[in-house]
């Protein structure tokens, strides 16, 4: 709990601060690579969401710009935060991946029954040779490793390789308008770089607060998939400012970070599934109203989230067939005055930038379902 004399930040104040740092209060005129670094990566469980994340954040965004940076290996897809795939700068891929190794160790522990008698150091060395010879699929890794440990669970062998090594998904996987199966090699090999030291916990906390603050220790731990970060925050306390939320939870922030007036207008934004602004905190009420908990489509990869006045207000999906593109919006409540028109205009803008279809339509429906 925060000190009683710490200033209180309302949910709306936290919303506006987070949206400002997430480049969601106005589209930013910054290069793609700079934006990816500033946001400490883009959630990339599926291949298309990173493109839609940047569409909603960058002025004049062209999907080809992100694809080009992936082809040039300045950006890569790799499992990092929360043991999920992210698109990172090359530098972050090399340094954040070892920072979150404890989470990969916990994941590996879940497969221990299938790895009895397996020398994990030898497995990692063999797997490194295989994927650096040429990128391999998980199926190929299973088939190559099984002869060395015929009594092991084949799936566990491949998972062990993925957990012990910093494996990136090579292109064309993840390129806009193209497809490719998941093939893996090491970050060092793909980026032609020696192994780097892990990013320091202190520096990572500061970067997190710059992109997601003000935030609690639990918020940061949820974002990163790490534990025992309280001592890091306490070590940094002299360099930070503290607040408390409406429930009295202590929040930390950078002294000079932007905290806009809670009344600052927030435009409608279309976020793809698994956008980090929806996943970057343990307490998500700064973006997701309590009444809509469990209704943000995160469990359904077909739907993204629509923010109106800064908060979750609807779900959306884009369907393309031939020359026709349709954005279907499922509202979670009755749109306020003018909001429906703003949603329509943003949906049409999305189709203009993110689809080659010449016929565009926006359809509204009402979400039917229940929360958690």
Image (cartoon, rainbow, N blue to C red):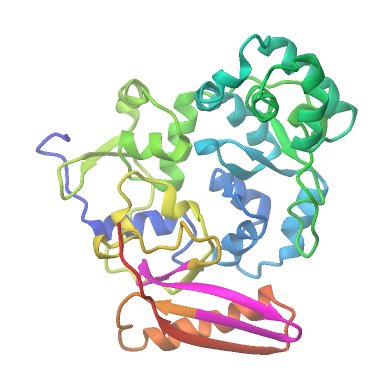
How many numbered callouts?
0
x and y, in percent, of residue 64 in the image: 77, 63
Tell me if residue 322 is in the magenta stretch.
yes
Whether residue 195 sits left or right of residue 6 in the image: it is right
Residue with the most extreme left position: 4
x and y, in percent, of residue 71 in the image: 82, 49
What secondary structure prevails in the magenta region? Answer: strand
The residue under the point 52% across, 23% down is: 200
Tell me if residue 11 is in the magenta stretch.
no
124 or 158: nearer the eye?
A: 158
| Residue 254 visible, this angle | no
Quadrant showing the C terminus: bottom left
x and y, in percent, of residue 229 in the image: 37, 25
354 or 21: nearer the eye?
A: 354
The residue under the point 46% across, 57% down is: 298
x and y, in percent, of residue 240 in the image: 32, 33
Considering only vertical position in the picture, is 69 above or below 160? below
Considering only vertical position in the picture, is 231 above or below 45? above
Residue with the most extreme front position: 151
Quadrant showing the N terminus: top left
The residue under the point 30% across, 38% down is: 216
21 or 69: nearer the eye?
A: 69
Whether residue 24 sits left or right of residue 93 in the image: it is left
The residue under the point 49% across, 59% down is: 23
316 or 9: nearer the eye?
A: 316
* Magenta span of residues: 305-328
Picture quarter containing residue 120?
A: top right
């Amino acid at each position: 709990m925060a000190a009683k004399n710490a200033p209180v930040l309302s949910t709306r104040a936290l919303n506006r601060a987070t949206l400002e740092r997430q480049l969601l209060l106005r589209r930013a005129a910054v290069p793609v690579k700079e934006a990816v670094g500033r946001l400490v990566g883009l959630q990339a469980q599926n291949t298309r969401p990173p493109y839609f994340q940047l569409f909603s954040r960058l002025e004049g965004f062209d999907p080809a710009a992100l694809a080009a940076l992936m082809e040039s290996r300045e950006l890569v897809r790799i499992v990092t935060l929360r043991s999920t795939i992210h698109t990172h700068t090359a530098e972050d891929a090399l340094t954040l991946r070892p920072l979150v190794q404890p989470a990969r160790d916990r994941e590996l522990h879940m497969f221990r029954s299938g790895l009895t008698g397996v020398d994990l150091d030898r497995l990692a060395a063999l797997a490194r040779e295989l994927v650096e010879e040429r990128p391999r699929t998980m199926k190929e890794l299973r088939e190559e490793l099984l002869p060395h440990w015929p009594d092991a669970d084949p799936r566990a062998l491949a998972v062990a390789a993925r957990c012990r090594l910093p494996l990136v998904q090579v292109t064309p996987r993840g390129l806009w308008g193209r497809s490719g199966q998941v093939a893996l090699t090491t970050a060092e090999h793909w980026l032609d770089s020696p192994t780097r030291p892990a990013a320091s916990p202190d520096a990572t906390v500061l970067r997190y607060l710059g992109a997601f603050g003000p935030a609690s220790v639990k918020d940061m731990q949820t974002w990163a998939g790490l534990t025992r970060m309280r001592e890091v925050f306490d070590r940094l306390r002299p360099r930070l400012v503290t607040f408390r939320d409406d429930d009295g939870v202590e929040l930390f922030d950078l002294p000079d970070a932007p905290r806009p007036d809670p009344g600052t207008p927030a435009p409608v934004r279309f976020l793809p599934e698994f956008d980090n602004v929806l996943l970057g905190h343990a307490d998500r009420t700064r973006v997701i109203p309590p009444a809509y908990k469990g209704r943000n489509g995160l469990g359904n990869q077909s739907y993204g989230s629509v923010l109106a006045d800064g908060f979750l207000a609807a779900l959306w999906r884009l369907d393309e067939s031939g020359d026709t593109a349709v954005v279907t919006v499922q509202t979670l409540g009755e749109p306020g005055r003018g909001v429906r028109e703003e949603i329509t205009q943003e949906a049409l803008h999305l189709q203009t930038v993110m689809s080659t279809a010449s016929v565009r339509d926006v359809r509204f429906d009402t979400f039917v379902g229940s929360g958690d």
